DNA sequence: ATTTTCATTGAAATTAATTTCAATATTATT
DNA sequence: AATAATATTGAAATTAATTTCAATGAAAAT
C-alpha cells in the first residue's frame, strides 16, 4: 500500500472517530462540520473531499454500526432468567470490547429520534422498543416459573432494557469509568424469594 | 384577569410545552424554531414576540426545571441501602407526578453536554456525575455492613444512577408506558446473601 | 365611537451553517 | 527531472437557519 493510501485511510478513520465522538456528546444538529474538521485536524474543504455531506458522514457511521453491532437474542431460551442473563452478558461484553462499540450503540439509539434520516437507514437501527416488547412474554413466563419477581411485565422489561441503555450511554461518554456487572442488571428481574422455598 | 392576559399566558405555556417536547425528542440543535412555532400553532414572528431567541427559550425551560426539580438526598442517612431506596422512591415519585417532571429531567440531563450554554446556567443543572461520585463512600459503607453487594463501588454507583437515568428518559419519551418500581432499581445494589446470616 | 395599545403575520434582513471550487502543495509515475 | 495525479487549503457561493420589522387586525381604554 502506498503512502498516500495509508494517509487517506488514516484521515478517513480520523474523521469518523471525531464525528462519532461529537455526535454522541452533542447530537447531530449541534455538531458542526467545522467542529469535526477541527477535531480531525483538517480544513472543512478536505472533509468534504472524504464525505459528500454531513448527512453522508452520519449515515456512514450508522452503516458501520449496524454492520458491527449485531445483537441477537434467543427468545426461545428455556430459562427466561438465563436468557436475560445471557443478553446482559452479551451486551456488556460488546460495549466493553472496545469504546467504539459503546459509542456506536449510543449513536444508533439517538438516531432513532432523528426525522431527517432516510427510511432505509431507520430500518437498520436496532430499536430498543422492539426488545422491550419482545421481552414481555418471556418475563411473564419467568414469573410463572417463580424465577422473576412479580409486577407489571412491561414495566419490568422497561426497567431491564433502559438500565442497560442508561449504563451503555454513560460508558460511551466516559470510556474510562469502571463498567458495571451484567449480573447486577439481572438482579432487577430476579425473584429473591425463590431460593428459600 | 383580562382576556388578553389569558391568551398571552396560554400561548406562553403552549410554546414552552411544545419546545420541551421537541428538545427532548430531537435535541437542541435539531429542533428548529419553525418546528416549535408550528407545533404551538403560531407564526415564527409571534414566537419571537414571546422569547427573544431560541437560546432564551431554552434557558427559560432550564430555569423552570431547576426551580421545580429540586432533588435533595441526605447522604448522612444511617442505613446506606435505605438512603438509596429513599432516593429512588423520591426520584420515581417525582417523574411519575407529572409527565412534565420526567421531561424536564431529561432536558436538564441533555443540557449538560451543550457548550453553547452560559456558565451560570450550567451551575443550575443537577449533574448526575455528582450523584455518582457522592454515592461511592455510601456504597462502601453499605458493603461493610453487608447491606450492599460486593463489587467496585464506583461501578455500582454508575449502575444505580444510570439505570434511573435510562428509565427516566424512557418515561419522558413515552409518558403512557407503565413506570417501573423504585424497589427494582434498589435490588441492583442489594446484597441477596445478607438475610440468611 | 374613537383612540390606543398590543397581538399577529408574512416577508425581508441577518446570521450561521454547509458546500463548492479555483489555486497550490504534495506525492506518485514516467 | 518532468509530468501527472491527487491531497489540501482558504475563500467564495449557496443554502438554511434565526431574527427583525413594517403593516394589519383585534381587544382594551377613553
Image (spheres, coloured by chain):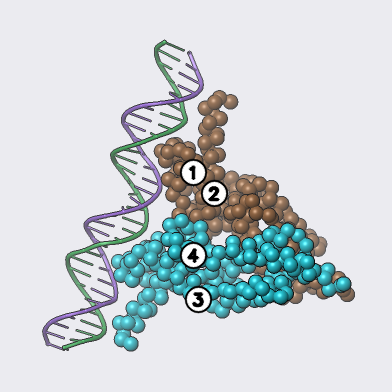
Chain colours: A brown, B cyan, C purple, D green
Instruction: Mark 1 and mark 3 in contact? Answer it, CB < 8 Å.
Output: no
- Mark 1: few/some/many CA within 10 Å (<14, 14-19, 20+): some
**Dot placed on the residue nearer the N-terminal end, 2 or 1:** 2
Q: Tell me if label 2 and label 1 are in contact, CB under 8 Å.
A: yes
Badge 4: how crowded within 10 Å, few (<14), some, or many (20+)?
few
Residue at image position (49%, 41%) is: A40
Q: Indicate the chain on which mark 1 is placed.
A: A
Query: Quarter-wise, where is residue D17 in the image?
Result: bottom left
Q: Are marks 4 and 1 in contact (CB under 8 Å)?
A: no
Mark in the foreground, 3 or 4: 4
Q: Mark 3 points at which residue?
A: B68
Cα–Cα span, label 1 and label 3: 38 Å
- What's the chain of the residue with tag 4? B
Marking on residue A21: 2
Q: In which quarter of the image is residue B155?
A: bottom right
Q: Which residue is tagged 4?
A: B123
Cα distance in 3D space between marks 2 and 3: 32 Å
Q: How crowded is mark 3: few (under 14 residues within 10 Å), some or many (20 or more)?
A: few
Q: Can residue B181 be seen?
A: no
Q: Residue at x 51, y 51 (%)?
A: A23
Amino acid at each position: 500500500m502506498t503512502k498516500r493510501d495509508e494517509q487517506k485511510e488514516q484521515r478517513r478513520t480520523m474523521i469518523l472517530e471525531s464525528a462519532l465522538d461529537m455526535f454522541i456528546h452533542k447530537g447531530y444538529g449541534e455538531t458542526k462540520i467545522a467542529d469535526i474538521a477541527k477535531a480531525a485536524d483538517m480544513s472543512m474543504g478536505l472533509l468534504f473531499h472524504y464525505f459528500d455531506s454531513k448527512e453522508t458522514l452520519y449515515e456512514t457511521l450508522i452503516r458501520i454500526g449496524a454492520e458491527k453491532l449485531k445483537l441477537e437474542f434467543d427468545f426461545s431460551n428455556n430459562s427466561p432468567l438465563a436468557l436475560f442473563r445471557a443478553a446482559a452478558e452479551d451486551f456488556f461484553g460488546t460495549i466493553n470490547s472496545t469504546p467504539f462499540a459503546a459509542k456506536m450503540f449510543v449513536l444508533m439509539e439517538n438516531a432513532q429520534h432523528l426525522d431527517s434520516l432516510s427510511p432505509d437507514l431507520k430500518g437498520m437501527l436496532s430499536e430498543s422498543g422492539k426488545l422491550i416488547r419482545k421481552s414481555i412474554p418471556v418475563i411473564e413466563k419467568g414469573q410463572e416459573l417463580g424465577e422473576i419477581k412479580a409486577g407489571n411485565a412491561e414495566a419490568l422489561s422497561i426497567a431491564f432494557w433502559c438500565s442497560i441503555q442508561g449504563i451503555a450511554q454513560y460508558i460511551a461518554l466516559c470510556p474510562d469509568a469502571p463498567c458495571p456487572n451484567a449480573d447486577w442488571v439481572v438482579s432487577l428481574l430476579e425473584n429473591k424469594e425463590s431460593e428459600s422455598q
